[in-house]
Image (cartoon, rainbow, N blue to C red):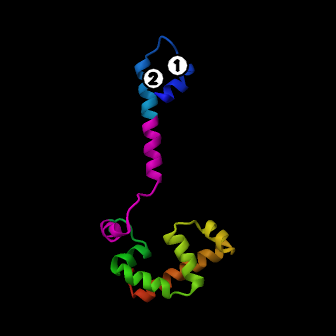
Amino acid sequence: MARALGAAWRFTPGTNLKAWLFRILRNLHLNRARQAARMPAAMSVEELPVELAAAGRALRSAEHEAALKADLAEVVAALRSLPAAFAIPLQLTAIEELSYAETAEVLGIPVGTVMSRVHRGRRLLLARLAVDVR
Protein backbone atom coordinates (compact mmCIF):
# COMPACT_ATOMS: atom_id res chain seq x y z
CA MET A 1 0.00 0.00 0.00
CA ALA A 2 2.89 2.34 0.74
CA ARG A 3 4.16 1.97 -2.82
CA ALA A 4 0.70 2.56 -4.26
CA LEU A 5 0.23 5.67 -2.15
CA GLY A 6 3.68 6.93 -3.14
CA ALA A 7 2.85 6.47 -6.81
CA ALA A 8 -0.75 7.61 -6.65
CA TRP A 9 0.01 10.44 -9.09
CA ARG A 10 0.71 7.79 -11.76
CA PHE A 11 -2.74 6.20 -11.53
CA THR A 12 -5.13 7.31 -14.23
CA PRO A 13 -8.64 7.79 -12.81
CA GLY A 14 -11.25 5.74 -14.58
CA THR A 15 -8.91 2.80 -15.24
CA ASN A 16 -8.86 -0.51 -13.37
CA LEU A 17 -7.58 0.24 -9.83
CA LYS A 18 -7.45 -3.44 -8.89
CA ALA A 19 -5.21 -4.27 -11.87
CA TRP A 20 -2.94 -1.30 -11.11
CA LEU A 21 -2.54 -2.39 -7.47
CA PHE A 22 -1.96 -5.99 -8.52
CA ARG A 23 0.78 -4.88 -10.94
CA ILE A 24 2.55 -3.00 -8.13
CA LEU A 25 2.32 -6.09 -5.91
CA ARG A 26 3.57 -8.36 -8.69
CA ASN A 27 6.54 -6.11 -9.46
CA LEU A 28 7.43 -5.93 -5.77
CA HIS A 29 7.31 -9.74 -5.54
CA LEU A 30 9.52 -10.17 -8.62
CA ASN A 31 12.05 -7.65 -7.32
CA ARG A 32 12.29 -9.45 -3.98
CA ALA A 33 12.57 -12.85 -5.67
CA ARG A 34 15.44 -11.60 -7.86
CA GLN A 35 17.17 -10.10 -4.85
CA ALA A 36 16.80 -13.34 -2.86
CA ALA A 37 18.24 -15.34 -5.75
CA ARG A 38 21.39 -13.20 -5.74
CA MET A 39 21.95 -13.63 -2.00
CA PRO A 40 23.60 -16.80 -0.71
CA ALA A 41 21.59 -18.82 1.73
CA ALA A 42 22.79 -18.49 5.33
CA MET A 43 23.57 -21.67 7.17
CA SER A 44 25.25 -22.64 10.40
CA VAL A 45 28.59 -24.41 10.50
CA GLU A 46 26.86 -27.52 11.85
CA GLU A 47 24.75 -27.76 8.68
CA LEU A 48 27.72 -27.33 6.32
CA PRO A 49 28.76 -30.97 5.77
CA VAL A 50 25.14 -32.04 5.19
CA GLU A 51 24.62 -29.19 2.73
CA LEU A 52 27.84 -30.01 0.90
CA ALA A 53 26.85 -33.64 0.60
CA ALA A 54 23.44 -32.72 -0.82
CA ALA A 55 24.88 -30.26 -3.32
CA GLY A 56 27.83 -32.46 -4.22
CA ARG A 57 26.33 -33.78 -7.40
CA ALA A 58 25.62 -30.30 -8.78
CA LEU A 59 28.91 -28.53 -8.00
CA ARG A 60 32.26 -30.06 -8.88
CA SER A 61 34.85 -27.47 -7.92
CA ALA A 62 38.14 -28.58 -6.45
CA GLU A 63 37.29 -27.11 -3.06
CA HIS A 64 33.92 -28.79 -3.07
CA GLU A 65 35.38 -32.18 -3.93
CA ALA A 66 37.97 -31.79 -1.19
CA ALA A 67 35.31 -30.87 1.35
CA LEU A 68 33.18 -33.85 0.37
CA LYS A 69 36.00 -36.34 0.60
CA ALA A 70 37.77 -34.98 3.64
CA ASP A 71 36.72 -34.35 7.20
CA LEU A 72 36.16 -30.66 7.94
CA ALA A 73 38.76 -30.80 10.72
CA GLU A 74 41.29 -32.21 8.26
CA VAL A 75 40.57 -29.40 5.81
CA VAL A 76 41.05 -26.77 8.51
CA ALA A 77 44.30 -28.41 9.66
CA ALA A 78 45.56 -28.60 6.07
CA LEU A 79 44.63 -24.95 5.46
CA ARG A 80 46.52 -23.91 8.60
CA SER A 81 49.57 -25.86 7.47
CA LEU A 82 49.83 -23.91 4.19
CA PRO A 83 52.37 -21.09 3.94
CA ALA A 84 50.76 -17.75 4.83
CA ALA A 85 51.40 -16.41 1.32
CA PHE A 86 48.93 -18.98 -0.03
CA ALA A 87 46.66 -19.56 2.96
CA ILE A 88 45.62 -15.94 3.49
CA PRO A 89 44.47 -15.21 -0.10
CA LEU A 90 42.74 -18.61 -0.20
CA GLN A 91 40.95 -17.94 3.06
CA LEU A 92 39.87 -14.45 2.01
CA THR A 93 38.45 -15.64 -1.31
CA ALA A 94 37.07 -19.08 -0.43
CA ILE A 95 35.92 -18.60 3.16
CA GLU A 96 35.36 -14.87 3.52
CA GLU A 97 33.98 -14.74 -0.06
CA LEU A 98 35.91 -11.62 -1.05
CA SER A 99 36.50 -11.01 -4.73
CA TYR A 100 40.02 -11.16 -6.12
CA ALA A 101 40.02 -7.37 -6.37
CA GLU A 102 38.91 -6.96 -2.76
CA THR A 103 41.51 -9.48 -1.60
CA ALA A 104 44.20 -7.65 -3.56
CA GLU A 105 43.20 -4.39 -1.92
CA VAL A 106 43.22 -5.92 1.56
CA LEU A 107 46.64 -7.51 1.06
CA GLY A 108 48.11 -4.65 -0.95
CA ILE A 109 49.20 -6.88 -3.84
CA PRO A 110 48.20 -7.03 -7.54
CA VAL A 111 45.07 -8.94 -8.55
CA GLY A 112 47.11 -11.31 -10.72
CA THR A 113 49.23 -12.24 -7.71
CA VAL A 114 46.08 -12.99 -5.71
CA MET A 115 44.78 -15.22 -8.50
CA SER A 116 48.09 -17.05 -8.73
CA ARG A 117 48.36 -17.57 -4.97
CA VAL A 118 44.77 -18.78 -4.68
CA HIS A 119 45.36 -21.28 -7.48
CA ARG A 120 48.60 -22.53 -5.93
CA GLY A 121 47.00 -22.58 -2.47
CA ARG A 122 44.15 -24.74 -3.76
CA ARG A 123 46.60 -27.17 -5.35
CA LEU A 124 48.67 -27.34 -2.15
CA LEU A 125 45.55 -27.87 -0.06
CA LEU A 126 44.36 -30.68 -2.31
CA ALA A 127 47.80 -32.28 -2.25
CA ARG A 128 47.91 -32.15 1.55
CA LEU A 129 44.47 -33.71 1.74
CA ALA A 130 45.52 -36.31 -0.87
CA VAL A 131 42.24 -35.89 -2.73
CA ASP A 132 42.02 -36.96 -6.34
CA VAL A 133 39.41 -34.68 -8.02
CA ARG A 134 40.08 -35.61 -11.63
Lateral position of residue 48 relative to residue 7, left or right: left
Could you tell me which secondary element the residue under label 1 belongs to?
A: loop
Q: Would you call the spot at circle 2 few (<14 residues within 10 Å), some (14-19), or many (20 or more)?
A: some
| Residue drawn at (52%, 19%) of the image | 11
- Is 49 above or below relative to 29? below
Quarter of the figure with residue 48 = bottom left
Q: Nearer the viewer, residue 11 or 60?
A: 11
User: Residue 79, how many percent across, how many down?
Assistant: 48, 83
Q: Position of residue 125 (x, y in %)?
A: 47, 84
> What residue sits right under mark 2 in the picture?
20
Tell me if residue 105 is in the magenta stretch. no
In the displayed structure, would residue 131 be above or below residue 21?
below
Q: Secondary structure at mark 2?
A: helix
- Residue 77 quadrant: bottom left
Q: Nearer the viewer, residue 55 or 32?
A: 32
Q: Main secondary structure of the magenta part?
A: helix
Mark found first going from the N terminus, 2 or 1 = 1
Q: Quadrant of the C terminus?
A: bottom left
Q: Tell me if residue 36 is in the magenta stretch.
A: yes
Tell me whether circle 2 and circle 1 mark residues in contact (CB < 8 Å): yes
Magenta span covers which residues?
A: 28-54
**Which quarter of the rendering shows the N terminus?**
top left
Q: Name which residue type carries label 2.
A: Trp
x, y percent for residue 105: 67, 69
What residue sits right under mark 1 in the picture? 11
The CA span between labels 2 and 1 is 8 Å
Identify the residue at the far top of this view.
14
Judge by depth and name the residue closer to the eye, 130 or 46.
46
Label 1 sits on what residue type? Phe
